[in-house]
Amino acid sequence: MDLRKWFTTTSTTVKTVMPSTTISDVDRPVTEAHPKDGRRASVTASSHNDDDTCPNDLGKDEPMQIRLNSYPLRLFGTRNRSFLHAWFQKRDWLEYSVKADAAFCYPCRKFSARSATQIKIGQPQSGTRLDPAFTTKGFHDWKHAVETNKGFNRHEMSKEHLTCYSMWKEKVSRIDKGKEISTLLYAEQIQRNRYYMSSLIDVVEFLVSNQLPLRGKIEAFDHMDEGGSGLFMSLLEFSIRKDPQLAEIVKTIPKNATYTSHEIQNELVAVMSSIVTDAIVKEIGDSWFTVKVDGTRDPTGMENISIVIRYFNEKTLEITERLLVMTIANSAAECVRNLRSEDEFCILCDTVTASTKDTPVSAKRRRQVNKNLSEYVVEETTGANIIDKVELRRLYFSALDHILGEIEVRFSERNSKFAAALAALDPENETFLDVKSIKAIMDLTNSTIVETECIVAKQYISRIKEEESQQMMTTRRLLSEHHKVLEAMPSVLSALKLAVTFGASTAMCENSFSVLKNVFTDNRRAMNHTRKSQLVQLAFERDLTKKMRNEWKDLVLRKFNSSTRRLQLF
C-alpha cells in the first residue's frame, strides 16, 4: 500500500453564477505556475501581451468563459447593452473578464506573432501588434460585437488571429499526445536522467533483495577515495566503471542532483515497499484471506510483530502467503511498569481477596516467617515442610482450573468444529465433503454448501482417485489440476479454497524473523522502525522486489517523480 491531493489554479471553462452573485464573487486571480527544476517553459507559452495590464481573472491554460445570469449594462445611445453568453458558441477563443466587463481573445493574448518571432530569433524584433482591444484593453463595444466586418467577426478573420489560433491548437494537440515543445527539446536529457535514476534503483534493489546494508560514512563521489563509502556508493561506482554509457551520463548530472544521499535511499526504499504492498493487495483481490500474526523481540528490546496474509491466488491457482507489514508493539516490560502502582496493587488484592472468601481456612496455626528474617528479602525457601493440606489443595485445584481454562479456550467447541470442517475437506478423509461438517467453515463467510454439488464432486473425485491410485490426492492438487471442472460446482470450489486459506500455523511469520535478524545487525541498530520494516518486507518478498528491475521500473520512476525533483524524469 500511499494519498496525495493536488490542487490547481486552472479555471474551468464554464461557470454558472446565481442571480445574487456579485463581481467580487467570481474574481479568480491567476498565478503564474513555475516550471519544475531543470525544465524550461514552453517557447510558445508566454507573450508580451500577457502582462500586468490585463485583468487577473482571465484564463491561464484555457479561455475563461464565465456564464452569468446577467452581465453589467453599458449605455449605447439611449439603449443599455451587455455581453451575452450566447457569443461563446462557435467562438472557443473568446473569453470574458468580470473585473473589466470586457471580452478578450485567449490565443492572441498568449501566442502573439511578435512574441513567437522574438523567441525564434532570440532578440527583440519590431512587428505589427495585435488589436489591443482583444489583448490588453478589452473589447466592450457590445452594439457592434456581432455585426459583419466588425467586432468579433472582423477580429477572428484577421491574419494575426488566425496565426495565434493555429499555434494555440497545435500546443493543445501536443499536450494531448504528450509531445510538448519542452519535452521534445529535452527528450534526450530526460532519457539520460531516467537511465541514471534507473541505475540507482538497480543498486538499491540488489542490496535490499540480498539483505545487505546500503549506506556508509561517504555519500558523494568526490570523497570516494577516503574510504567508508558503504555498499551503495561502492556498487554504484562499480556500475559506472563497467557501463560506459552510465559513465558519460554521470558527467551531465548536476552535483546538487546526484541522488546519492541517505534521504534519497530511504525514499527509494519507501517507494519500492509501497509498490510491493500495493501488488500484494491487488493480488489478493476479492479472495478470502487469513491474517497470521506473530512477534519477536529484537536486540534493542523492541517487540516486532509480523503480519502475514494467506490467500488463494486465482492466477496461479496456488495458496500464497505474503508478508504485508512488520509493525511494533510495546515491550512487556512497559506493561509490568504500569502494574507497579498502588492503585493496581489494591485492585489485584481486592480481586484475590474476593475470590478466596469462601475458601475454608485451616484450623491449624498458620506458619509464621522467622522473626530474624523480618528485615530481609527472602528469595528462597526456609526449609520448612509444607503440611497445610488446605493450602496444598487450593494450589492443586487452582493449577488444574488454569489448565482446564486454557484447554477450553484452545480446544473449544467452536475450534473443534473448525478442525472437523478442515478434515471434511481433505480428499483422503472418510468424512470428505460431509455437508454438516463443512457448514462451520462456510459460516465464516456467510456462504452455503449445496448438497447435490457435494454428491457430484465426491463421485468425480472418487473416479479420479481410482485412476491415479498411486498418487495421494490433496486439496491443493484438486484446486490446481481440476479447477476448471470444479467451477461447475461453485459451492464445493469455494469450500476447498476456504480450507487451504485457513491458516494453521505461523511458520511464515517465524521465517520473517530470520530476515529481521540479517537486516537488523549490530552495525545497523540506529535505523528507525519504518525503514527496518520496509527493508524486511523487500528482502522477504524478493520475488516481487526483483520486478523493480524491468517490469515495475517505470512505476518506481513515476512514484519517485511525484514529488518535485531537480532531475526531470518525465
Image: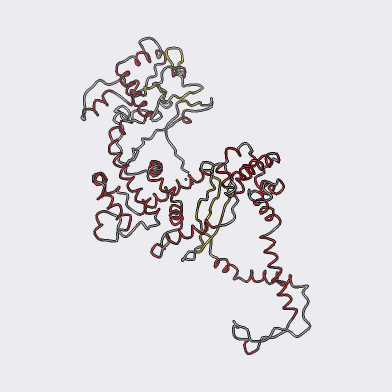
Does residue 136 appear in the picture of this structure?
Answer: no
Query: Residue 9 location, x and y as percent?
Result: 42, 34
The residue lying furthest to the top in this view is: 148
Up-down: is 33 above or below 320? above
Residue 102, image quadrant:
top left
**Which image quadrant: the C terminus?**
top left
286 and 178: which is toward the camera: 286
Q: Residue at x 68, y 53 (%)?
A: 420
Query: Residue 74 location, x and y as percent?
Result: 44, 18
Does residue 503 appear in the picture of this structure?
Answer: yes
80 and 445: which is toward the camera: 445
Q: Residue at x 26, y 53 (%)?
A: 221
383 and 344: which is toward the camera: 383
Q: Is residue 275 left or right of residue 262?
A: right
Indicate how the structure is coloured in the image: secondary structure
Query: Residue 99 location, x and y as percent?
Result: 42, 27
Up-down: is 531 above or below 30? below
74 and 311: which is toward the camera: 311
Query: Residue 546 location, x and y as percent?
Result: 40, 48
Up-down: is 196 above or below 119? below
